[in-house]
Image (cartoon, helix red, strand yellow):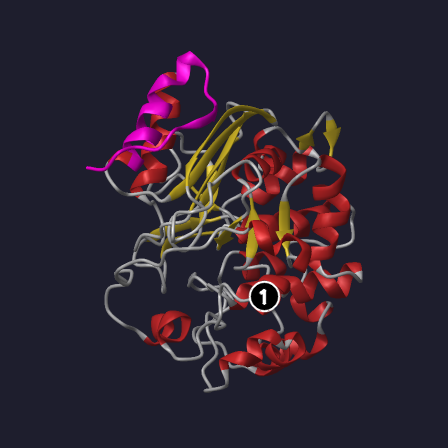
Amino acid sequence: MTDSPQIHGLCPDRFAAVRAVFTQNFASGQEVGARFALADRGEIIIDLFAGHADRARTRPFDELTLTPVFSTTKLLASLMIARLVDQGLLAYDQTVASIWPAFAAEGKGAITVAQVLSHQAGLCGIAEAFDPALWFDWDVICDKLAAMVPIWTPGTASGYHPITVGYLVGEIFRRVDGRTLGTALREDLAEPHGLDLWIGLPDSEHGRCAEMQRPTGMPDLGEMTEARRLAFGTRWAAPLGRESAQWRRFEIPSGNGHATAPALARIMALLADDGQLDGQARLSPGTAAEVMQERICGPDRVLPRKVSWAAGPMRNSVEPVFGPRPNMVGHYGWGGSCAFADPDLGLSGAYVMTRQSVHLVGDPRATALIDAVYQSL
């Protein structure tokens, strides 16, 4: 056990159990810096933060600290695609090739937008070896994915696409909207609503980023199949330099979002509150429901678990990792971050941290906080 740092922020007495769990996560030595936020129909009702933003423990983790959230970024990408659907510019059952003709190569012509979002495209990693620096060349990676032979027959199974789905979704968005997805996120949602959310972080913001403490081991993926090897196990499976200025600057809508927990909690109100944010309809209720609709359910070919995938989010109905309610949706990021929405109760929340664990889904620190919320209701 270690001494717990001073806990800052907002936590009403009825959520004392949440504060107790947050404090215990530090006291047990599981945290260096962390933040947990909960929103009720977009209004923040819990905002706890503590610890340090750097590995040397000289810089406090405070209200302005930005944390890399890795795959929790995928929720932001799915919401931006949903806005195109809501505007009638795109449909979930539309083929990707109708937007991106080169993508039809090697039998991929029938793959739909919804299948890409739900990890059914069979493109969970790139088979041919290449310099990992090329991940920072958007067009090169998109060309590789368009030319690629799927690893399994698209539409027959899900297989989590940890990095590649960001390029697929980002290219779909760019071809329909004309802007990059990260630019549109800032212009359409983050800036109008005062949300500290970024995919593609300008240099002016780098000084307030948290430093991540990497996990001491690797996730347990089970048997190392070809799909898992290409997703996680090759030298070129992911970009290098995940705290470099180049990494922070570049837009990868699957993995390099930077955010605060309250900003994530608030934007997830789009799913928790029928598309509303700050009293404004940013999605229609029908489109919000479409985002959360199950697209495929079964054993995932990359994650060692059964997953119910919606159009981007994970659904809570199979192996609950976002609390007790089956209609909840959300996503985890490498090392523990997560965001979630409960459309039944209008609640949404997020957890961010600097000490990464080996859990790809269902980090115990986050699940304990979410469980404490529901025990307090």
Q: As drawn, is 265 to the left or to the right of 326?
A: right
Q: Residue at x 60, y 74 (%)?
A: 136
Residue 285 position, x and y percent, is 67, 33
Residue 133 found in image quarter: bottom right
Q: Is residue 12 magenta?
A: yes
What is the number of callouts on the image?
1
Q: Is residue 133 magenta?
A: no
As displayed, is residue 361 above or below residue 346? below
Residue 140 position, x and y percent, is 63, 81
List the residue tagged with mark 1: 245
110 vs 46, nearest the viewer:
46
Residue 329 position, x and y percent, is 48, 39
143 vs 236, nearest the viewer:
236
Q: Which residues are magenta?
A: 1-26
Residue 353 found in image quarter: top left
Q: Secondary structure at mark 1?
A: helix
Q: Residue at x 56, y 75 (%)?
A: 135
- Amino acid type, mark 1: Ala
Asked whether the viewer can see residue 177, the reply is yes
Quadrant housing the C terminus = top left
Residue 5 position, x and y percent, is 35, 33
275 vs 309, nearest the viewer:
275
Q: Residue at x 31, y 58 (%)?
A: 215
Q: Quick one: which residue is furthest to the front in this view?
A: 58
As displayed, is residue 185 above or below residue 228? above
Mark 1: few/some/many CA within 10 Å (<14, 14-19, 20+): few
197 vs 144, nearest the viewer:
197
Asked whether the viewer can see residue 111, the reply is no
As displayed, is residue 116 above or below residue 273? below
